[in-house]
Amino acid sequence: MVDLGLVFRRAYGPAVATLTRVFGDISLAEDAVQDAFVTAARRWPQDGVPDNPAGWIVTTARNRAVDTVRRSRRGRELAAQLAAEQRAEVAPGPERPDILRDDQLRLIFTCCHPAIRPEHQVALTLRLIGGLTPAEVAAAFLVSEETMAKRLVRAKYKIKAADIPYRVPGQVELPGRLRAVLTVLYLIYNAGTGDVARHDLCREALRLSRLVADLMPDEPEAAGLTALMLLNEARRPARGDAGVVLLRHQDRSLWDQALIREGQDLVLWCLRRGRLGPFQLQAAIQALHCAAPRYEETDWPAIVRFYDRLQAVQPTPVVALNRAIALAEVAGPGVGLSVLDGLADQLAGYHAFHAARASMLERLGQRDQAARAYALAARLARSGPEVQFLQGRSRALDAGT
């Protein structure tokens, strides 16, 4: 028996992308694909599952969309145009992988158009490309389903009202637009970290990142983002489902070596290209972590050098925070703490900043201050496992254990 939910997740994005190309209307495409899945849920248990379930969904959705447009004012004209296109095609569009890939790429860039608000870009990408339900997208943003439904409607209205083109940007636009797409995928991945219940978001972000990297094989930043996700995913089995396991305490035999090799190969390809962007540099740092057989053998000086380069191209407080953590492993916790204290105004509301301070204070033997810093980090953290871990560290220091 086919898993209809799995078929939905795999076929929804390509089907919506294909129908959007054909009809030029995202809402029409969505409605038709959803109707096709309703029909499948009713007919497949009785008639049997077709040999190509995804192709069946696309064909059924396309027929449903044709029926819909025939009832509209422009119906006859559009129906005639579609019939002519079908006769001219050597093979139907939904069956051609090259057209399917191009359709998905066009839709990703449409979702991530700069005219659309960033939070709406992420939501729309998850819905239209990732195939997540409005309820799943709402859960990813910790908002109600009603609130998310309104966001999705507003985003799709913006595409229509602003006449945002359904196409891949030209060569002049591409570098700036590609960064928006990669940033959206990175945000989707981060939304799924730290909570095992939301790991589907990480898997979906990795799948979409692979898609973009495959569609744009000469874009090293796309490869860098994919490598970054692969190397993070490789260590997930050692982090545990119920809590937080720090890098220094992880059982490295649990790391997924196949994912590590794939990620490191991508990093090496990027390094040979020369000019490294932010995602490539982050991936290079993670590759060095994954290359160390033991925590004590980590090449911290090289990691600091990569953070220096990352800070030059992405001078954000979070990058400075991570650099300070690495610097503490090279020059000692006192030096790291001094750098962190210079970031206090910018990162006062960020739990990871206070957790890093707490760790360095603990290593310096300042247990009372470390306990208070851990407690503050716990109050600011949002992930349940992180809150429990930070509270546990604070209580342990208070108890003198």
Image (cartoon, rainbow, N blue to C red):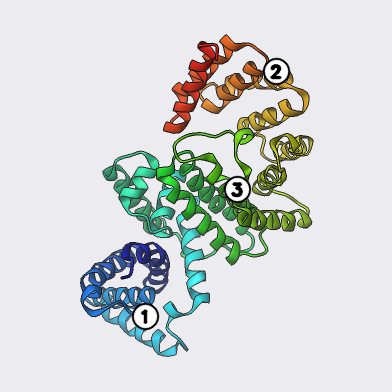
Q: Is residue 177 left or right of residue 221?
A: left
* Crowding at mark 2 (Cα within 10 Å: few <14, some 14-19, many 20+): some
Q: Residue at the spot x=35%, y=64% of the render?
A: 8
Question: Separation of disc 3 and disc 1 at Cα?
Answer: 37 Å
Q: Secondary structure at mark 2?
A: helix
* Residue that carries the numbered disc 3 in the rendered image: 255
**Between discs 3 and 1, the one toward the N terminus:** 1
Residue 371: image location, x then y, percent:
54, 14
Q: Is residue 303 left or right of residue 386?
A: right
Which corner quadrant holds the N terminus? bottom left
* Amino acid marked by disc 2: Ser
User: Is residue 207 placed above or below 294 in the rendered structure?
Assistant: below
Question: Separation of disc 3 and disc 2 at Cα?
Answer: 33 Å
Query: Which mark, residue 170?
Result: none
Residue 387: image location, x then y, percent:
45, 27
User: Is residue 190 placed above or below 264 in the rendered structure?
Assistant: above
Viewer can see residue 112:
no
Q: Residue at the spot x=38%, y=51% of the render?
A: 155
* Residue that carries the numbered disc 2 in the rendered image: 338
The quadrant in which residue 43 appears is bottom left
* Residue that carries the numbered disc 1 in the rendered image: 51
* Amino acid marked by disc 3: Trp
User: Is residue 219 placed above or below 317 in the rendered structure?
Assistant: below
